[in-house]
Amino acid sequence: MNTPQNKKTVTAAMLIIGDEILSGRTKDANLAHFAEQLGAMGIQMREARVVPDVEDEIVDALNALREKYTYVFTTGGIGPTHDDITADCVAKAFGVGIDYDPRAVAILEAHYPKGHLNEARMRMTRVPDGGDLIENPISHAPGFVIENVFVMAGIPVVAEAMLESVRVKLVGGKPVQSRAVNARLAEGQIAEGLGAIQNSYADVSIGSYPFYAKGKFGVSLVLRSTELDQLDAAEADVIALVKSLGAEPIDRGALMQGEG
Amino acid sequence: MNTPQNKKTVTAAMLIIGDEILSGRTKDANLAHFAEQLGAMGIQMREARVVPDVEDEIVDALNALREKYTYVFTTGGIGPTHDDITADCVAKAFGVGIDYDPRAVAILEAHYPKGHLNEARMRMTRVPDGGDLIENPISHAPGFVIENVFVMAGIPVVAEAMLESVRVKLVGGKPVQSRAVNARLAEGQIAEGLGAIQNSYADVSIGSYPFYAKGKFGVSLVLRSTELDQLDAAEADVIALVKSLGAEPIDRGALMQGEG
């Protein structure tokens, strides 16, 4: 396992498991929430993959991600039905066995009325060898963590609760702070000046994101850094650039957004 | 390039490029739309990756996806600012040169008032050698296609318009039809019967997706197949299963949804 304490940058990836996301029927709602919550803890989301309910795809993606990032969070595929194959895939990825976990069995025995803990529900107590449980205060069936991989439910209210459950186990780096400057300017007007500002601040990452709202384009200029003084200085330069082009920073409020 | 005409199954992947999606600030809105539109054309979305504005990450992901799937659609990073590096990354992935494309230059020359086509905006006319343009009826700067890779804007209204522009170039397989049966049942109640139905229909993929709405759980049972008679028969079996458990199929309407 990576040791976050020794790393300057603590990273994360998400593995979103489920045919429904890839069919377009369900929109993933977990990536944005996890990215924001982890980001505030100093853990930078660096990649996300969406894969179908297919063993080889899940195993390969998990093995690629867990080697590369400090933490990996999987969502989806841990329910009681035939298409819930995540736990088995995680065991296979780690090359370990999987069995009913007595701690998980005890949780579900306490939750279900007598006679309702059937074979399908018992599937939700299967945990790869070496895994620890992740508490699920919503629907009880636990997730699990094995090494740097956190295996969670896909349904957002449960995934979010599970993230709260594991928060104390996560060790973050220096938090990334951000500033956004929005303006009714075209990217092409601001690009040259913005590039010059980016070149002046090695520790600040400046992104430019056009948006389209009410029939007009605008741009969100987003600055990110772990160094607050650099961030403040770069933000001042960006605001000065916007004003030099005859515009004013605006509050985008509820305007529709996109990225470019 | 893969030849879709010779493949039983035509597949696609999306490569979503942009720090903003990974920071959680912007929610991707393109995957679901592309998945639905392509699915209706008989092109099955099989994987999606979200990567940051980092050259190696984009190049590696693109090379992995373009080998594996019939079509790859990238979104994001084709604007005029310093963080728009997608075109260069695509050229590097294919090992080809990149230069100002006279067709793209002509489009932007016609669009911008005299003197407004500055160096930054000219960046948007750079196309890898061998690429063809993708028309952009919204904001004019074109996307491009090279072999089986379609390079598009990230801003949803532009991405959707570009997908319409390339629709005639895409060759689909047999369309996947779907049926959804929703019920106020717990997955654990229906899992055993559902698994048995799945085992009876090799050509139907049955997914089970719990949802949580108004304080109660329910389940969406989604059946997919290219074979309509199999789909109809499996759907009838699933409805019978739901009724045998004392429930009725319901219209989920606007209930909040998730996947499990």
Image (cartoon, coloured by chain):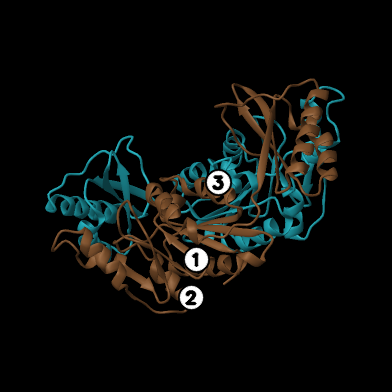
Chain colours: A brown, B cyan
Work out whether residue A99 can be spotted.
Answer: yes
Circle 2 crowding by C-alpha within 10 Å: few under 14, some 14–19, many from 20: some
**Among numbered discs 3 and 1, the one appearing first in the sequence:** 3
Label 3 sits on a secondary structure element that is helix
Q: Amino acid at mark 2?
A: Phe
Who's the residue at 80% across and 40% down the image? B123
Label 1 sits on a secondary structure element that is strand
Q: CB atoms at circles 3 and 1 under 8 Å apart?
A: no
Q: Amino acid at mark 3?
A: Glu
Q: Is residue A52 above or below residue B252?
A: below
Image location (x, y in percent) of residue A76? 41, 57
**Pointer 3: what residue?**
A36
| Most foreground residue, B29 or B170 | B29
Image location (x, y in percent) of residue A99? 33, 76
**Pointer 2: what residue?**
A94
Who's the residue at 64% across and 50% down the image? A175
Circle 1 crowding by C-alpha within 10 Å: few under 14, some 14–19, many from 20: many
Image location (x, y in percent) of residue B87? 74, 48
Quarter of the image with the N terminus of chain B in it: bottom right
Q: Which mark is residue A149?
A: 1
Image location (x, y in percent) of residue B161? 59, 35
Q: CB atoms at circles 1 and 2 under 8 Å apart?
A: yes
Circle 3 crowding by C-alpha within 10 Å: few under 14, some 14–19, many from 20: some
Who's the residue at 72% across and 59% down the image? B56
